[in-house]
Amino acid sequence: MLPPSRRSCCATAATLFILASSSKIFSDTAALISNLDVVVAVDTAVCHLAGALAKLVFVLLPFVPDWRWLLDRDDSPWYPTARLFRQNEDRAWDGVIARIGAALRQHFAV
């Protein structure tokens, strides 16, 4: 869950929903995603589902990501609506959160 100190990066752009474990059925998760403007997620089934639904999805990736995200790119050949936000160094999420905040502000034009 995003700590309150980090929520300010996007709280002015739109209503922020934290949906951790709010759904137990995958079809409910798909329905929920289809009603969002953008999904922000780490590499889980949620980001793959959002990509498969062609929903704008910002994916937070660790310094050494899973092979399917490839390297040295911020897009995905499998999910055209995905934007990849990678760590610049191991365990350093501050830069990733800052870049996602900027992308959200740009997307929502605030």
Image: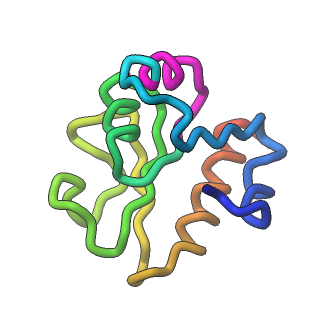
Q: In this view, does 105 lie above or below 66?
A: above
Frontmost residue, 15 versus 12 = 15
The location of residue 98, given as percent across then percent down, is 64, 65
Farthest residue toward the left?
67
Tally the numbered discs.
0
Q: What residue is at 80 percent from the left and 47 percent from the top?
A: 11
The location of residue 63, given as percent across then percent down, is 34, 75
Q: In the picture, which quadrant includes the N terminus?
A: bottom right
Q: Is residue 109 above or below residue 64?
A: above
In this rendering, position of residue 93 left or right of residue 26? right
Frontmost residue, 56 versus 21 = 21
The type of colouring in the image is rainbow
Q: In which quarter of the image is residue 48?
A: top left
Please give the range of residues in magenta: 29-39
Q: Quadrant of residue 62?
A: bottom left
Q: What residue is at 64 percent from the left and 39 percent from the top?
A: 107
Q: What residue is at 48 percent from the left and 33 percent from the top?
A: 56
Q: What residue is at 32 percent from the left and 40 percent from the top?
A: 45
Q: Is residue 34 magenta?
A: yes
